[in-house]
Image (tube, rainbow, N blue to C red):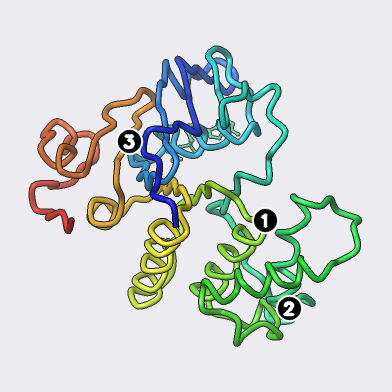
């Protein structure tokens, strides 16, 4: 396996401003994410984290500023299958929802092939691989609604993986699931980042876990407050006020 290229920036955000109506939500944000990075995005509630992700994904248009994805201006970017998104509000399926785990993950192939293509052997192979990566292959024929919240979350990660992305954005992936499932999810993400060279960007309120799991941390409070290694993040005492958290109590694992 070739080593991760830590110099190649795949996402570049330059001087980005965004407002909903009159209300400025992102102010002059400049941030780069390199290939193989595992970036934790933290900040208080309503600080603009989800908005920033939506701007990077082209779902919201910035008022000012530049976004480059894999070297292309976002306006010219075509290879959207390289970027997957696991949103915070993934639908919570009812018990009888008529889709199996396998079918939900197959949907992840549409981004690559289009909505109306015939399912190919390659689609099935990538679906199987994705489900195995998240330890959910044994559940492939279960109805999605029969699974626990933590298991559903892993299926959504498999769906994101099925499109063979190079970067996955995860918005609060562990909210509402129990500790054991959280630990399993973090272990899966660690493996995807380390073994598959996948770039991960994770929004989370769990500062302790972000410090332990990620390579870099960006703290957003409408502006970019800091973008640092976990070690330097822990040294930055003004962050405690912003995050309302005693970061001195946290120990970095690496
Ligand atoms: P975070 O993800 O950090 O909690 P968000 O990006 O969701 O923050 O929201 C940033 C700010 O933008 C908040 O004040 C929120 O109320 C506001 N906001 C979010 N979505 C909308 C919207 N669709 N219309 C108007 N205001 C919004």
> Residue 134: horizontal and vertical position, in percent?
51, 72
Q: Which mark is residue 218?
A: 3
Report whether the residue tagged 1 is closer than 8 Å to ligand 1. no
Is label 1 in contact with label 2 (beta carbons under 8 Å)? no
Residue 49: x %, y % from top left: 44, 37
Q: CA distance from mark 1 to mark 2?
A: 18 Å
Residue found at x 39% / y 73%: 184
Is 25 above or below relative to 99? above
Q: For marks 2 and 3, give the CA distance.
A: 37 Å
Q: Which of the two discs, 3 and 1, labels the residue nearer the N terminus?
A: 1
Question: Residue at 33% of width from left, 38% of height from top?
Answer: 43
Q: Residues within 10 Å of mark 3 (few under 14, many from 20)?
A: many
Label 3 close to label 1 by CB (< 8 Å): no
Q: Which residue is mark 2?
A: 100
Can you tell which quarter of the image residue 216 is in? top left
Q: CA distance from mark 3 to mark 1?
A: 26 Å
Closest to the camera, between mark 1 and mark 2, is: 1
Residue 205 horizontal/vertical position (percent):
33, 50
Task: First in sequence, mark 1 or 2: give its number.
Answer: 2
Q: Quadrant of the N terminus?
A: bottom left
Residue indicated by mark 1 = 163
Q: Residue furthest top?
A: 64
């Amino acid at each position: 396996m070739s080593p991760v290229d830590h110099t190649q920036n795949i996402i570049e955000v330059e001087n980005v401003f965004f407002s909903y109506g009159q209300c400025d939500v992102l102010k002059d944000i400049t941030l780069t994410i390199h290939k193989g990075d595992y970036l934790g995005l933290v900040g208080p509630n309503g600080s603009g984290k989800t908005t920033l992700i939506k701007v990077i994904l082209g779902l919201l248009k910035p008022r000012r500023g530049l976004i480059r994805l894999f070297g292309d201006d976002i306006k010219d970017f075509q290879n959207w299958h390289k970027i997957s998104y696991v949103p915070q509000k993934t639908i919570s399926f009812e018990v009888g929802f008529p889709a199996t785990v396998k079918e939900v993950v197959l949907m992840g192939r549409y981004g690559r092939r289009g909505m109306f293509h015939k399912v190919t052997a390659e689609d099935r192979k990538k679906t199987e691989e994705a489900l195995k990566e998240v330890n959910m292959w044994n559940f492939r024929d279960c109805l999605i609604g029969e699974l626990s919240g933590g298991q559903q979350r892993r299926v959504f990660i498999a769906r994101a993986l099925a499109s063979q992305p190079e970067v996955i954005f995860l918005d609060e992936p562990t909210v509402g699931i129990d500790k054991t499932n959280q630990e399993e999810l973090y272990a899966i993400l660690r493996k995807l980042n380390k073994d598959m060279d996948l770039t991960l960007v994770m929004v989370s309120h769990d500062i302790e876990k972000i410090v332990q799991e990620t390579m870099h941390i960006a703290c957003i409070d409408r502006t970019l407050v800091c973008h640092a290694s976990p070690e330097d993040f822990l040294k930055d005492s003004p962050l405690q006020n912003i995050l309302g958290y005693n970061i001195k109590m946290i120990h970095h694992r690496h």
